[in-house]
Image (cartoon, rainbow, N blue to C red):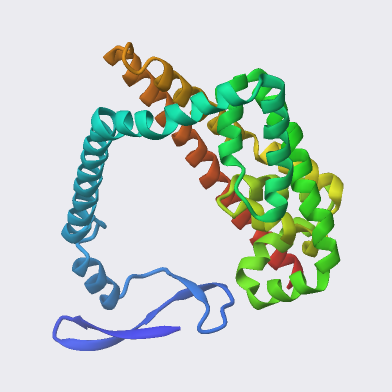
Amino acid sequence: MMTYREEDGGGDEVVPELCLRVGDDANNGDYVKLKQGPQDRETDEGFGGVGEPSSPRRGACLWYWVKLLVLCISLGLLTAVCIKWVGPFFMDKEIIPIINWETTTFSTPVLAVLVFASLALFPAVLLPSSPSMWVAGMTFGYGYGFLLIMSGVAIGVSLPFFVGSLFYHKIQGWLERYPKRASVLRSAGEGNWFHQFRAVALIRISPFPYIIYNYCAVATNVKYGPYILGSLVGIIPEIFVAIYTGILIRTLADERHSLSAQQIVFNVVGFAATVATTIFFTLYAKRQLKGLQNEDELLLQ
């Protein structure tokens, strides 16, 4: 029960104000007023009765779109400069000599063995394998290139998993030094088979370093079955981007003087769309990982 003073005619009168309590709160509880008090009327008048976006908020939104427009224009100009001058120079001085050396030195079967070996062994010695994927795309295209990369990656993610088991306690100590970052990785070692498979696939799609997770996975107690299958599924977007990059490099190197403006724009737009799709899946994976992390934290409470 609350009261306030109300002027009626010439005098002041204490009028009861009825409040209906709905729930219980740690502080004062929640209630619904059946009669509006003067303080509430003043609050409503102060806010104009109806909430409207403030001027600073509109200004911040407008400034955001201006910055986005300037960023897009800058990226467009930078892309045009790269296509016009930087790309051809880099092609003539670096890419084309490497492709010529590759085709004259190695036959196709030997090159397939080299690509497979690099994909299988490079992750174990902490070396990036993306250039090998580009070579697979340049030489074998989507079909054989995809199968070759998947077979090499299957070994490339398995070797560090088994080697890391020899340093289990050291890796555990490293994860304990970074508990916030390690919490995402530990989520992959909890739950049932499908939960582990899903978490590993999302980690592979996310921007978490590919080589580091190969060794850290064993310390999260994830089983090998969901680990290997989740890794192969999660790396598919990266494989297609790498193959497309290799094919694009080969196309630009072979037909750089005969490509029309329309073909160049088509290739650039296709590459940009591929990258945009990869970014979309990466952001989606990060959001899903955050959800899994929150679920695990709730279960532990």
Residue at 25% of width from left, 56% of height from top?
A: 50
Foreground of the two, 236 or 120: 120
Q: Is residue 105 left or right of residue 49?
A: right
Place of residue 115 in the rendered image (x, y in percent of width and height, measured from the top left): 67, 33
Question: 230 left or right of 255?
Answer: right
How many labels sit on residues?
0
Of the pair 92 and 246, the residue shown nearer to us: 92
Q: Where is residue 249 in the image (x, y as percent from the top left)?
A: 45, 26
Relative image position of residue 76 (x, y in whole percent): 25, 35
**Residue at the left extreme, as displayed:** 10
Q: Position of residue 283 (x, y in %)?
A: 51, 46
Whether 148 is drawn above or below 254: the answer is below
**Which residue is at a point 60% across and 57% down the rendered structure image?**
290
The structure residue drawn at horizontal position 27% and vertical position 77%, both measured from the top left corner, is: 39
Residue at 23% x, 34% y: name it: 81
Q: In this view, does 107 lie above or below 292?
A: above
- Classify residue 162 as left or right of residue 180: right
Given the current orientation, which residue lies at the most extreme front position?
A: 105
- Quarter of the picture containing the C terminus is bottom right
Residue 4, compared with residue 144, is above or below; it is below
- Residue 216 in which image quadrant: bottom right
Which residue is more in the foreground, 191 or 40? 191
Is any atom of residue 16 visible in this view? yes
The answer, for residue 194, to whether it is visible in the render is no
Q: In this view, does 206 lie to the left or right of 195?
A: left
